[in-house]
Image (cartoon, rainbow, N blue to C red):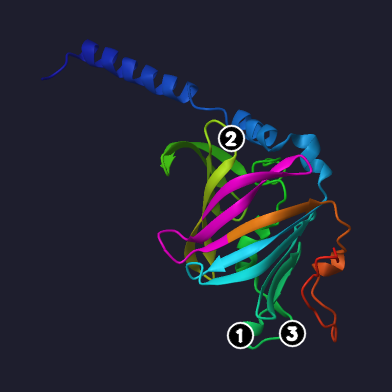
Amino acid sequence: MKLKRNAAAIVAGLLAGVALSGHAAARDVDQIAAKNVEAKGGMDKLQAIKTLKRHGKLLIQGGQYRLEYVEMQKRGGMIRDEATLQGLTVIQANDGKEGWQINPFQGRKTAERTPPDDNKGLIEDADIDGPLVDYKAKHYQLEDAGTEDVDGTPAIKLKLTRPGGDITYLYLDPDHYLEIRSVSLRTEHGVPVEMQTDYGDYEQVAGVYFPFSIVSGKKGSTDTQVIEFDKGEANLDIKDAKFHFPAPGVIVGPVSETEP
């Protein structure tokens, strides 16, 4: 059926109006980010946390191996992860400028600097607040990406673009506005990598909710690692030296329970 010119113009106008209405009805990402901050405990409580230390277990290969796990974070982009099995401790760290690691399971007992592409995930994890807090100050771009099912939950989906072009899709619980999943698309050594992380079992530390269950791995893969935290502490006096590349001759061991 052919429309007369006037009728076609009217229909085109109606369709344009629908498109504009849909755009106007798009969710305000700033409001969503603000609700995320409030759900975590509010900006004041978040900013009051200068360091965060969590203890727990790291489960790999389907839970066949359970490693003692410690994660320390400090403002300024500092992070240090430790996983211990049978007296051997793997350390991954970043001091906000460079990353390094010790992996005795690969026969390396001294610290080695790691290339920037290997540190991307670690740098993202170093953010105590999470990517939505002060996202503009971090020079991130945030867009509404609709709604997507996450294990039966119609999650709020946001697209976050980092300054280097890497993209993270964030999925928020529609009732509580906390992250339940993230999917990161980044380029490492010229190869695109897609990582999925699920968050759950939120617990309060110093009045702020943090996930105590974190399951991560390449999207679509059954080879995942599971972190189960059982203890969290805030504002311990963790020295910057814990995150810096060790000086020559310094023996680096795991952080003890009594030592920040």
Crowding around mark 3 (Cα neighbors within 10 Å: few <14, some 14 to 19, many 20+) is: some
For residue 14, above or below residue 244: above
Secondary structure of the residue carrying numbered label 2: loop
Crowding around mark 1 (Cα neighbors within 10 Å: few <14, some 14 to 19, many 20+) is: few
Image label count: 3
Q: Read off the magenta span.
A: 197-226
For residue 85, above or below residue 94: below
- Tell me how far mark 2 sits from mark 3, CA to CA: 42 Å
* Percent x, y of residue 136: 68, 40
* Percent x, y of residue 94: 73, 66
Q: Quadrant of residue 221?
A: bottom left
- Residue at numbered disc 3: 110
Work out which quarter of the rendered image holds the N terminus and state it. top left
Q: Quadrant of residue 92?
A: bottom right
- Tell me how far mark 1 sits from mark 2, CA to CA: 41 Å
Q: Residue at x 71, y 86 (%)?
A: 109
User: Dots 1 and 2: beta carbons under 8 Å?
Assistant: no
Which comes before the other along the chain, label 2 or label 3?
3
- Tell me how far mark 3 sits from mark 1, CA to CA: 11 Å
One can see residue 169 in this view: no
Q: Is residue 78 left or right of residue 150?
A: right
Residue 209: numbered disc: none
Crowding around mark 2 (Cα neighbors within 10 Å: few <14, some 14 to 19, many 20+) is: many
Q: Residue at x 84, y 85 (%)?
A: 248
Q: Amino acid at mark 3?
A: Thr
- Residue at numbered disc 1: 106
Q: Residue at x 68, y 38 (%)?
A: 40
Secondary structure of the residue carrying numbered label 3: loop
